[in-house]
Structures are given as C-alpha cells and as structure tokens.
Image: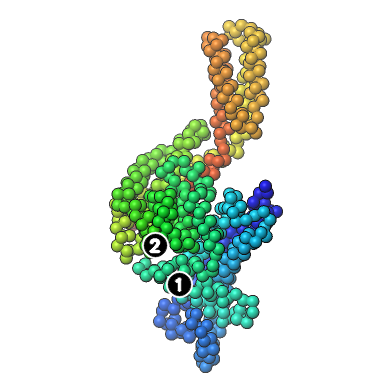
Amino acid sequence: MVDFLADNNLCGQAILRIVSRGNAIIAELLRLSDFIPAVFRLKDKSDQQKYGDIICDFSYFKGPEYYEGKLEAKPELQDLDEEFRENNIEILSRFYLAFESVHKYIVDLNRYLDDLHEGVYIQQTLETVLLNEDGKQLLCEALYLYGVMLLVIDQKIEGEVRERMLVSYYRYSAARSSGDSNLDDICKLLRSTGYSSQPGAKRPANYPESYFQRVPISATFTSMVIGRLRSDDIYNQVSAYPLPEHRSTALANQAAMLYVCLFFSPSILHTQQAKMREIVDKYFPDNWVISIYMGITVNLVEAWEPYKAAKTALNYTLDSANIKEQATRYAASMESLRPQVQQLLKEGFLREEIILDNIPKLLNCLRDCNVAIRWLMLHSAESAYDPNNKRLRQIKDQVLNDSKYKPKILFQLLLDTAQFEFTLKEMFKQMLSEKQIKWESYKKEGSERMTELAEVFSGVKPLTRVEKNENLQAWFREISKQIESLNYEDSTAAGRKTVQLIQALVEVQEFHQLESNLQVCQFLADTRKFLHQMIRTINIKEEVLITMQIVGDLSYAWQIIDRYLLLCLLNKQNKASVK
C-alpha cells in the first residue's frame, strides 16, 4: 500500500496541507493579538469621544447609510476618518487575512471530508484514513486546530474589538464592492460571543459549543475523531512513559485535543456519563489543569462546570483526599529528585561508560523530573484559578499547602533538569555519531587478540609455559573469524552472536584449565571486554534521543514560565539591594 504521506498520495497530501496551514494560522493569530490597536478597545473616554462616530460594531450593517451620512455631514469627521484609515489599514488588512484564513480553513476541511465521502480519493474513505496511523493523527489534529483557532480568537481578541475591526476593514477596503468577497461568512463566524477573558466575567450560555457550531461540521467525523481520541494512543506516547503513574502525562497532548474536540459534540459533556467517566479515568485521574496549546491553560473545574456528566465524572479527581495524595506525591518527588539531579550534574560524573551502563536509570530520572515539574507548574499556576471562584481558591490553597510549594525550588529543579537533559543529549549525540567507528575498532581489537592466541597455541609464537595445542589453535582462529564476520548493519543478530562468543570464551577458560596461565587469561579477559564494549555500543540508539525529546517537552509552560522568571529577577534585585 502507498505511504499515506507520499508525494503522490493526494489524499494524504491534502489533509497534511490543511493541518500545516492550521498551525500557521494559530501562530499568526497569537502574533497579531499583541498588536491590536488600543483605539479599537474604546476604553478611554477621550477615544470614545474622538473615534466613537467612525468606529462601529456590527450594528453598522443594520443601517450603513445612516452611519455614512453622519460622517458626510461633518467635514472634520471625514478628515479624521481618512487619517484613521491611513494609519490602520495595514494592520486591519493583516487581521482580516488571518480571520479569512480561519474561515477558509474550515471550508477546506469540510470540502476534504465531502471529497472523502464522495469517493474522490480512490480507495480512501473516512474509515480507511482513520485506520492509517498518520491519517488518524492528521484528522484528529485538523478538528482540534480549528477549535483552538476559535478559542484563541475569543481569548486574545475580544468580540467587540473583532467586530469593530471587521467593520473598519469593510469600510476602508475594496471588499464592500467585491462580489466574490466572503466577508459576510467571516462576520457570521467571528461575531462577538459575549465571552470575556477578564477574571470574574460571567460565562455566556452554551459557550463555547454554540460558537463551535457556527459552521456545521459532519457529526460522523466529529464522533469518529472523538472515538479515536478516547480509545487510542494516537501518538504512541505511552512507550516513552512506561510507568503506569506517568500515563496521564504521556497522554497529556491527546487529552488537550480531546478536551477541545468534545465541544463539537456537547451531548457527551451534558448527558453521557459512562463516556465521561471513561475519559476522566483515562486522562484526568490525577490532574485538572491542562495546557491546550502552547501554554494556554484551562482549569477543568471551571470549564466543565455547566456540563452535568463532565462535572460528575470529575468529582473523584477533585476529592480532597485525591488532591492531597497527588500533591504529597509530587512534594516527595521534589525532595528526592533535587539531590539526585545535582549529583548527576557534578563535574566529570556523566562519563561515557556511566551513561552506557545506566541509560534506563538516567531516562527514568528525566521522566520523574519532568512529570513532577509539569504537575506542580500547571496546578499552581495563577492563570488557572479564578480568584473570584471560592471552590477554585480552596483547591489551589490545598495544592500549595500539601505540595509544600516553593516557586524558587521548583524553578531551580527546572533549570537543573534542563542542564542535565542538555548534557545527556549532547553526549548521546556524540556517542551516536562515533558509534560505528568505535564498534569496528572494538571488533578489530577482539579479533586480533584471538588471532594472537591462536599463534601462541601453534607453538610459533613463544609464550611462557604454553604448550602447542592444535585444537585450541584452530578454535581461537575460528573465534577470530566469527568476531570478524559480525555485521554492524544487522545489530540484532550481531548482539545475539556477541553474547554467545562471550559465553564461549568463559567456557574455554574453564574446560581447558587455562586459568594457570595469567597471560592467556589476560588475552581472554581483554577480548571479553572488547565484546562487552561492542554490545554496549550497539545499544546506543536514536530512540533514546527521541524519548528525551518527548519527555522534555515544555510547551505547556510557554506562558506560565514568565512568572518564575519574574520571581528570579526580583530575588536578584533584592540580593543586590541588601549588598
């Protein structure tokens, strides 16, 4: 079967392009959110008085003639309007293109799903794409990214501001005279939802599900995507986190995707208790603060409050005893991990032989550090708890008390872990690049030792008190050939054969009473050492680097890390002032 992502596979390439575009759109929205012209917020009275007549929300569309008539009646307003246009048309155009790309994204995704349904892609259906590993990941990401776009827009660019910007763009651009403009559809999708990201703001009814349903998406598609996210490990992350207590961390990215996708099928959140129980047991048994995209945190206690089934399912996780158990567990982890990592960072401790002998232990230490840091940083984050919500305040206080939370110590562990991770990764990359050269060198040394021993037992090469023995001579020559025949490319077979050769060298020493001759023993011991080195070297695999990359993911702290950096700066300033 053709690879799903092959260049000649139109079905795979089409969904890959859509998903790639989705990530680019979110990046652009996050960039633009830092450059919203303050005047569109109309927060100051001076702005309201000066620009109130030329900046309108969607009420403009009910009677554009009325608004334009007001401008034409006052020449000073016309001058102000022209000046405002010149100053803002560039940034307005960029915002409009970003908003348009969100609408185009969902239109293209719906068209792709229609094409799948209608058999445009030969031998490919929604079901077969979901059976393919790459296809399953891309379809799940496609729906998730659309949900993230909508949430990012609403969280970073307030509804009223969006409306004012869209109206201003409409007035100042050629879109109003263009017949093929889809500005109407964009306005319908991005009109204000009533949501405000300010602490204490009331959540609108049926939010965000009504917002997510503004452009209809196939119910079969959303159902199948949610089904896959519920049941499968779509990114095979569990292999990087073998311990059962790390499972929720292993599946954290998938849990974030499921959280977003569930809003496309709100009946699950409202009424399907069995499904929600299964979801919480698998993804949220020990955590309730999640990062949905590049550090945008969500507290499930608040997010799932309006949904009966979801709220009920989360009750066990939020039980006081469970919160205490998790918090104390991570407090204990911190206590034991700090000296452990500091020991590993001591100058000269991490040597090549230490790493080769302790790869599983070192990886376990990295996992434990990253899991503890992740849980503590997310569950102590200020942004995850609304100070006006009494229950959230209680949960946060319990977490901080039971985990003995000290931001400075946590940040220090993060820095130490990063240093340990970097050192280990660099050394491992170096070993990986030299792997074949060293393996061939050890093989050559081992083979030469056996050839020399064969010559010793031939009687040609003099060695103290060694009698000629043709059987041993032939046997050592054969062992030399066997070592020489080991193939680097076939590492599994080479590893197995190397173990057998080591065993044979142990046995020959016992059966032929060679212990009495120290020089022969030394030759055998050296050869065994080289063979052991070959086994250790062949076990240097790229999978270790991949595991380290997965385990070391810090994208969840993209925003909350700023708080720790600020604390660090304040501490330095305080110390400087004391001096």
Q: Earlier in the sequence, mark 2 or mark 1?
A: 1
Q: Quadrant of residue 196?
A: bottom left
Q: Which mark's residue is nearer the viewer, 2 or 1?
A: 2
Image colouring: rainbow
Q: Quadrant of residue 118?
A: bottom right
Q: Relative to the observer, which residue lies in front, 203 or 267?
A: 267
- Is residue 570 something that shows in the picture? no
Q: Relative to the observer, which residue lies in front, 47 or 270?
A: 270
Q: Relative to the observer, which residue lies in front, 325 or 482?
A: 325
Label 1 environment density (alpha carbons within 10 Å; few <14, some 14–19, many ≥20): some
Q: Residue at x 60, y 25 (%)?
A: 497
Label 2 environment density (alpha carbons within 10 Å; few <14, some 14–19, many ≥20): some
Q: Position of residue 285 (x, y in %)?
A: 39, 50
Q: Is residue 223 above or below residue 204?
A: above
Amino acid at the residue labelled 2: Tyr
Q: Is residue 192 above or below residue 287?
A: below
User: Circle 2 sits on which residue?
Assistant: 307
- Is residue 43 something that shows in the picture? yes
Can you tell which mark lies on residue 23?
A: none
Q: Residue at x 40, y 70 (%)?
A: 205
Q: Residue at x 58, y 50 (%)?
A: 131
Count of number-bearing discs: 2
User: Circle 1 sits on which residue?
Assistant: 193
Cα–Cα span, label 2 and label 1 = 19 Å
Secondary element at tag 2: loop
Amino acid at the residue labelled 1: Thr
Q: Position of residue 516 (x, y in %)?
A: 52, 9
